[in-house]
Amino acid sequence: MASLLASAYRNVMRSKAGTVLAFVVMTVLSGLLALAGDVSGYFGLLFFGGLGVVYLIISRRPRRAPVAADDSGIVSGTHVTLSGANRYTTQTVGMVFPGRQGFALAVTVGSAIFVAAGVVFVVVGMTSTMESPGLTPSVAFIIGIGAVSIAFFGLCGVLGLRSLLGVSGGIALLPEGIYVQAPAGRAWVRWQDLAGAYVGYTQGQAHIALCAKTSDAIELSGLNQRLHGLNRKYFGMDVGYPGQYLHVSPDTVVSAIHYYWQNPQAREQLPDLRN
């Protein structure tokens, strides 16, 4: 029975509608607690209600300007390269699909708000335990929400801030392979080591997934490296790039990847495309 419930939960949480429903249910339950006079209900309303609003804002489909295709029918990116790509390739020029810093700013600001709220939750909960000895379920709930908020949104904020202040993000197609500069770290895979590229969906949000022929045929750094085993085992990919971070649609990038992957002569011309 437990396994069936866990499976149903995973299926619901994979969709945007399921996630929104979960926030609505938790917000309603928190409201009922608040009406009953339980102080933890007010914190639940703030946390789950606010988190649901932020999720809807961040997960909305971005407005993207129409882009033109070249003679091959492939939409091109900026013909430059991404910072750090020279660590993996001798080529200094390639086709780049740059990331959206505006989205990173929204993630950073939203995360900062929830980290601050988490700190308030923890402080209020700890103050309550000092005034009234003993950890009641309501106080434990408040402290738990605060701790989760600080940990989760703290990580999101760091990744968002890194995208704003660090190197520019995006996906670069180079003659030797594909280079990814994502908020969660770098990725590099050579064309001959690529096993597949596709657009995947998690909770209704699109991401570009890259798969190498073997787990050691792709070079990763940062959080991407730490999550490599989980991504490969449970999601069938070695690395993913959030579609929300791109100026163009993920399908456009995947189409370009497949075009150059299947046309060695075309990718040899990538350094000259900006001329």
Image: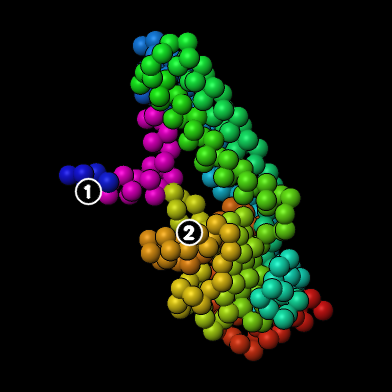
The quarter in which the C terminus is drawn is bottom right
Residue 168: image quadrant is bottom right
Which comes before the other along the chain, label 1 or label 2? 1
The N terminus, quarter of image? top left
User: What is the distance, in whole Å, between disc 1 and disc 2 at their CAs?
Assistant: 24 Å
> Residue 60: which disc?
none
Does the magenta stretch mainly form a helix, a strand or a loop?
helix
Q: Is residue 187 above or below residue 165?
A: below
* Residue 51 drawn at (x, y percent): 51, 33
- In the picture as drawn, the residue positioned furthest to the bottom comes out as 265
Q: In the depicted view, which residue is nearer to us: 256 or 139? A: 139
Q: Nearer the viewer, residue 111 or 19?
A: 111
Image x and y of residue 153, in percent: 55, 39
**Residue assigned mark 1:** 3
Depth check, front residue: 151 or 81: 151
Report helix, strand or loop for mark 2: loop
Between 203 and 158, the one lying in front of the other is 158
Q: Is residue 125 visible?
A: yes
Name the residue located 46 percent from the left edge and 50 percent from the top edge.
Answer: 204
- Which amino acid does the dot numbered 1 rest on? Ser
Question: Which residue is the site of mark 2?
Answer: 227
Task: Please state the horizontal and vertical placement of residue 242, each as a whole percent of the image.
Answer: 56, 56
User: Which residue appears farthest toward the right when viewing the image?
Assistant: 275
Q: Nearer the viewer, mark 1 or mark 2?
A: 2
User: How busy is the neighbourhood of tag 2: few (under 14 within 10 Å), some, or many (20 plus)?
Assistant: some
The residue at the point 49 percent across, 52 percent down is 205
In magenta stretch: residue 22? yes
Magenta span? 7-26
Q: Is residue 80 above or below residue 32?
A: below
* Residue 66 in sight in this render: no
Say how the picture is coloured: rainbow
Q: Quadrant of residue 222?
A: bottom right
